[in-house]
Image (spheres, coloured by chain):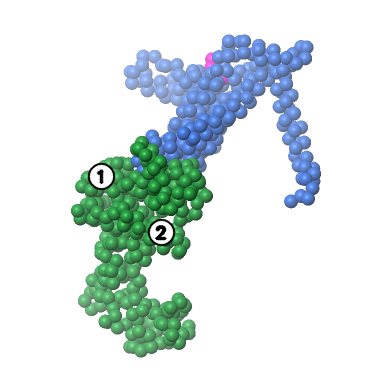
Chain colours: A blue, B green
Amino acid sequence: MFEDRRIGLALAMPAAVFAAALFLAPVIILLSEGFRGAEGWTLAPYIDFFSSDRNRVVFLRTLKLATLVAGVSAIIGYATAFAIVSLPPASRGRMFALVTLPLMISPVARTYAWLVILGRTGFVNQILVGSGLMDTPLRLLFTETAVFIGLLQLFLPLMIISLISAMENMPRDAVPAARVLGANWVQVFFKVILPLTREGLVVGGTLVFTGSMTAYITPAILGGSKVLMLETLLYQRVTVANDFASAAVIAMILIVMAFSANIVLKRMATARARR
Amino acid sequence: MSDFVSLEGLTLAYGSTIAVDKLNLTIAQGELVSLLGPSGCGKTTTMRAIAGLMSPRAGRITIDGRDVTRLPPSKRDIGLVFQSYALFPHLTVYENVAFGLRLRSESDLDAKVRSGLATVGLEAFADRAPKDLSGGQQQRVALARSLVMQPKVLLLDEPLSNLDARLRLDMRMELQRVQRETGITMIFVTHDQSEALALSDRIVLMKGGAIEQLGTPEEIYSAPVSGFAADFVGFETILPDEAGGGLAWRPGAVVLGTGPHQGTVIGTAFAGERREYVLGSALGQIKADAPVSAPPLRMGETIAFDLPRERAVRLERLN
């Protein structure tokens, strides 16, 4: 369109300057905190961070829970998405609305609901104790399981939605065609559905993984200070210890993990498809 | 064997809607039978049930003497060419054709795939992606993909409806050649009477989930049993007779210029070798053809016409 590329560049400048000044620069300043020591640049904050047992536990727990939540939501997501796209159009719309409904409710409210269900005198314990299965209430809150359940419930809709849109883009009749050609359901999944929905899986997996990793409210309410995740640890470092170096380190770790997750998921998806 | 494929009391339903009601049909080995009817008549549903993609509410399906009613599609020895072709977009043409053979871990897979592609004249396209092929080529890949499995029965869903006129003729000849060479039993579903008439040994005309008429193309074309059947094969003028049945005329059977009835021309169309008219009359709308050699009628013109009894087909019932 533009006869001179420079005109195009010039027109892009205001937006570029705006993004650089207000978004990129603060991120760089924030992250550089993690490399600044008493005498100039250093990796000391990173070494300090990872030499603490507690920090390593929190790091590995965050990685583990985010991976588990992404993995389990993929399994549940595929089953749910396939069931929904197999429905006639009218009920498909209703089910899709049902899936998106939780996204319109505040995560705080959704997480507090789990307090009511999982608490000492909550719904689950009332049934367990009331029916005589248990003598004393189980401790369900402030465990990794509670955080896992909360995160799964919070982010599963994103996986289901990604997979539904991927499945709707599969050619009609690809699944019946594979079945007629002799594939059982496992083969249909690995040879047809998975390769044809891998972009959806990468999108959904990245959303769920990074979402779980960076969620604050859910681990804060359901895990508390007993089950710290990177995000709750970050908040604690800043508000309680005024330790901005650790906070910057954690922020950096979260960014690196998010990008790595996306790359790893893409690799996994293409590797599976080639076979 | 006159009952190579048999459907006994087949009832199919979507939820509470009955799509096919107690259907009985037998098909001989090597026969080419078409299921013909308007959309919603149950023809595609019947085909999906034969393929095993839908379980019947009641009834039995046997193929080559074996009860397959409860078997999954993979165990039925059938092939299915979908209307949408349903090629796998993530695989090459070669891999599409090899898909079923690989699942069976078949020996000399390469030779079978190559000869399958050769059958449909697409050897040169083995490494292409399906999306780089034309519609007609994609359909031939789908056909090859089914044929290499050497199914006992080949099901085809509207095999010609997505093709343009020239390709239709090619594909029709292709299907007839495949059928001649392999002697495979074919069942194909269509809403197009000319397709069914041209290809089939027998036609199953369906209406509302049941068989309306079953017969050879000649019988279906020239001796419809009901108003519905007549209307479907081009009898445009259908009137009740004294005996409770009906009489039906094709547009070419209506005599223009003389006769006891009067009609006003309310539609005209030039169709090459003839002119087609629609007349408004006391008997309702009458469609009539006239040779191009006859002087053309103008819109609004009044003309005498006759519906000669000897040119009509007698229908057992009106609808």
Q: Is residue A111 left or right of residue B1?
A: right
Q: Magenta span covers which residues?
A: A225-229
In percent of the image, x 45 and y 16: which residue is there?
Answer: A139
Residue under circle 1? B68
**Residue drawn where x is 36% and y is 66% of the image:** B194
Residue B200: x percent and y percent? 31, 61
Residue B276 x, y percent position in the rendering:
43, 78
Toward which corner of the image does residue B257 lie, by quadrant? bottom left
Residue in the foreground of this view, choosing between A236 and B234 = B234
* Secondary structure at numbered mark 2: helix
- Mark 1 and mark 2 lie on one chain; the one further toward the N terminus is 1
Q: With respect to residue B304, does A267 lie above or below?
A: above
Membership of A228 in magenta stretch: yes
Which numbered mark, 1 or 2, is in the foreground of this view? 2
Per the rendering, the mark at residue B171 is 2
* Residue at the image position 33 percent from the left and 65 percent from the top: B197
Q: Position of residue A92 (x, y in %)?
A: 44, 45
